Amino acid sequence: MKEQGLPAAAGAGTSKLRLNAEQWSVLQRLARDGACAAGDRPIAASWRLTSHGLVATDRKGCAYVTLSGWHRLRQGR
């Protein structure tokens, strides 16, 4: 059974991608604050986060957490 609102690829049966402490922290900050909060320095997402589809960038260059990224956050550290 797939979770509501998530593509089948992000559901059960996928292995948990291991993230180091810095990558985990960046993913959490992006989920909490977003990358382009007014007056703040933009949060730079690592190549690993973007290449695995956890984070993407919009037209303005602001990083955001994808559905796969939200799924990974729900899995926990």
Image (cartoon, rainbow, N blue to C red):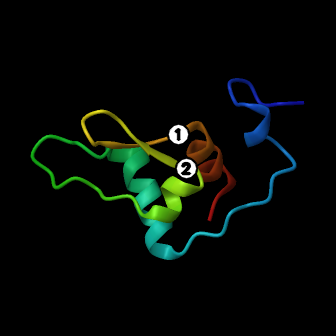
Crowding around mark 1 (Cα neighbors within 10 Å: few <14, some 14 to 19, many 20+) is some
Horizontal relation, residue 49 to residue 62: left or right: right
Vertical relation: 12 (above or below) 2: below
Q: Does residue 51 appear left or right of residue 41 in this picture?
A: right
Counting from the top left corner in percent of width and height, residue 56 is at 45, 44
| 19 relative to 29 in the view: left or right | right
Q: Position of residue 42 (x, y in %)?
A: 22, 53
- Residue under circle 2? 54
Q: Which residue is mark 1?
A: 66
- Residue 20: quarter of image: bottom right
Labels 1 & 2 near each other (Cβ < 8 A): yes
Tell me the SS state at disc 2.
Answer: loop
The residue lying at 59 percent from left, 37 percent from top is 67
**What residue is drawn where x is 55% and y is 49%?**
54
Image quarter hosting the C terminus:
bottom right
Please state, as top left, top right, bottom left or bottom right, where the N terminus lies in the image: top right
Hey, what amino acid is under mark 2?
Leu
**Of 73 and 18, the residue lying toward us:** 18
Residue 40 location, x and y as percent?
15, 51
Circle 2 Cα neighbour tier, 10 Å, few/some/many (<14 / 14–19 / ≥20): many
Q: Say which quarter of the image contains residue 5.
A: top right
The kind of residue tagged 1 is Thr
